[in-house]
Amino acid sequence: MPRQQFRKQLLAARQALSTAEREAAAQQVSDHLLALPELQQSTTVGSYYSVRAELPTQTLNQQLQLQHRLALPVLHPISLQHLLFLKVHPQTRWQANTYNIPEPQLRCPDIVPLSALRVLLVPLVGFDAHGNRLGMGGGFYDRTLAAWHQGLLPDLQPIGLAFDCQYVEALPHAPWDVPLPRVITPAKVWDFRG
Ligand SMILES: Nc1nc2c(c(=O)[nH]1)N(C=O)[C@@H](CNc1ccc(C(=O)N[C@@H](CCC(=O)O)C(=O)O)cc1)CN2
Ligand SMILES: Nc1ncnc2c1ncn2[C@@H]1O[C@H](COP(=O)(O)OP(=O)(O)OP(=O)(O)O)[C@@H](O)[C@H]1O
């Protein structure tokens, strides 16, 4: 089955969840995440601002902002299809990007380099038994994770967040796809590291 077909099917699966199911899933995923050793001391976490039928991150992000340091993605204004991560603080001003996703207003002092992030929470549409990831199709996270994949960001821990219905046994993958080392769903913490 081609990527686009998987994307359509997996997007439909999560859209079929009720608000209550979504909220319960978010709570379970958040509990798994906050119990990881990486989160036991104050650290810098890159997350995403959930929209539409994505695994909700609002409550989790509030907690991360209070107990850790929270950074969220901003579409790079010059380097197309790349992301910047910006620190979120009480004075953060918000604006909607071209996909209608809220993002912190771009202020240079708020930029957090990827090398300063310990954990990066990655949104996804689907994942498979090898950690292969299907996203929204912009290639944003493949580009973001390329340097990590090459071993240039040894301190960064990417972690996908998903509903259980986003799992499929095998996804088609392209040369630029960066498989995730871990994915957290309500049912379990998937660890794909050898
Ligand atoms: N919450 C969240 N933030 C994120 C992502 C994400 O998946 N979720 N991204 C992950 O990469 C980046 C944004 N990438 C995105 C790429 C496509 C679409 C999207 O809705 N595409 C529509 C077509 C829109 C259009 O082309 O104008 C679609 O596929 O139907 C959304 C976000 C950065 N921020
Ligand atoms: N590291 C890269 N270098 C160059 N091009 C890339 C890279 N990663 C992805 N691309 C391009 O981005 C496009 C979208 O990739 P893909 O369909 O894998 O996105 P995705 O992982 O589903 O989306 P996202 O990461 O934004 O959630 C591809 O057509 C590919 O050409």
Image (spheres, rainbow, N blue to C red):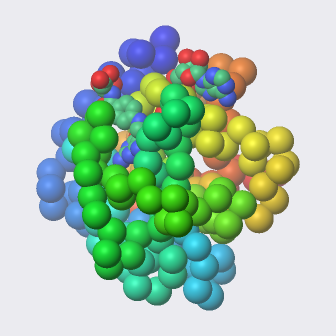
Residue under the point 28% across and 63% down: 93
Q: Quadrant of residue 11?
A: top left
Residue reaching furthest top?
Answer: 2
Residue 88 location in percent, x, y?
41, 69
Residue under the point 29% across and 34% down: 98
Horizontal arrangement in the rendering, residue 43 relative to residue 175 (left or right): left
Q: Is residue 135 above or below residue 96?
A: above
So how many labels did they put on this image?
0
Residue under the point 72% across and 21% down: 175
Q: Quadrant of residue 128?
A: top right
Q: Quadrant of residue 150?
A: top right
Task: Say which of 25 and 42 sits in front.
Answer: 42
Residue reaching furthest left?
Answer: 19
Q: Is residue 8 above or below residue 27?
A: above
Ligand 1 resides in the quarter of the picture at top left
Q: Is residue 177 above or below residue 118?
A: above
Observer able to see residue 165: yes
Residue 2 location in percent, x, y?
49, 11
Residue under the point 84% across and 48% down: 151
Task: Say which of 70 and 124 sits in front.
Answer: 70
Residue 105 location in percent, x, y?
35, 56
Residue 26 location in percent, x, y?
33, 64
Observer able to see residue 161: no
Q: Is residue 103 above or below residue 3?
A: below
